[in-house]
Image: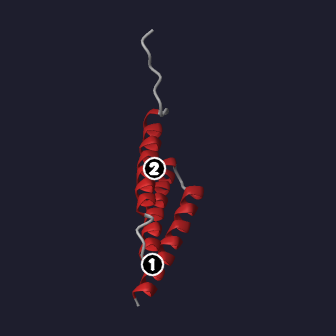
Amino acid sequence: MFEIIMLISLLLIAISSLMYIYRVIKGPSTPDRVIALDAIGINLIGITAVISVVLNTDAFLEVILLLGILTFIGTVAFSKFLEKGEIIENDRDQ
C-alpha cells in the first residue's frame, strides 16, 4: 500500500513538473518563468526523495543536497539579473 501511494505521489510530482515546463515556455513575464524554474528544481528534489524512499536507499541524499544548492544559487542569480540587469558586477576603481 505504501509503495502505491509513493508511486502515485511520484506521478503527481511529474505532472506538476510538466505544467511548470509549460509555464516556463509560455509564461507571461520573466519573473513567472523564474518562479517556474525554481519550482521545477524543487520538484526534482521531491522526485529524487520519493525514488530514494521507494528504493529504500540513502544513496540519493547527496544528490538531493546538490540539487537544493544549485536551485538556490540559480534562483538568486536570476533574481539579481532581474533586479540589476547583470549577475556579476565588474566595478573596479581605476
Crowding near pointer 2: few (<14 within 10 Å), some, many (20+)?
Answer: some
Q: What residue is drawn where x is 45% and y is 78%?
A: 54
**Where residue 54 is drawn, which disc sits there?**
1
Percent of width and height locating residue 45: 44, 63
Q: Amino acid at mark 2?
A: Leu
Task: Write the residue at 47% across / 43% down.
Answer: 78
Q: Are marks 2 and 1 in contact (CB under 8 Å)?
A: no
Q: Nearer the viewer, mark 2 or mark 1?
A: 1
Residue 73 location in percent, x, y? 43, 45
Residue 62 in which image quadrant: bottom left
Q: Position of residue 66 (x, y in %)?
A: 44, 53
Q: Position of residue 28 (x, y in %)?
A: 54, 54
The residue tagged with tag 2: helix, strand or loop?
Answer: helix
The answer to whether residue 22 is above or below residue 80 is below
Nearer the observer, 25 or 47: 47
Q: Residue furthest top?
A: 94
Looking at this view, is 76 or 3 the one in front?
A: 3
- C-alpha separation, residue under disc 2 versus residue under disc 1: 24 Å
Quarter the N terminus occupies: bottom left
In the rendered image of this protein, does residue 92 appear above or below residue 86?
above
Q: Secondary structure at mark 1?
A: helix
Residue named by callout 2: 70
Q: For this rendering, which residue is in front, 46 or 91?
A: 46
Q: In the displayed orientation, state which residue is furthest to the bottom.
A: 1
Q: Residue type at mark 1?
A: Val
Q: Quadrant of the C terminus?
A: top left
Relative to 15, 49 lies left or right = left
Q: Is residue 88 above or below residue 46?
A: above
Q: Earlier in the sequence, mark 2 or mark 1?
A: 1
**What is the tally of numbered marks visible in this picture?**
2
Q: Residues within 10 Å of mark 1 (few under 14, many from 20)?
A: some
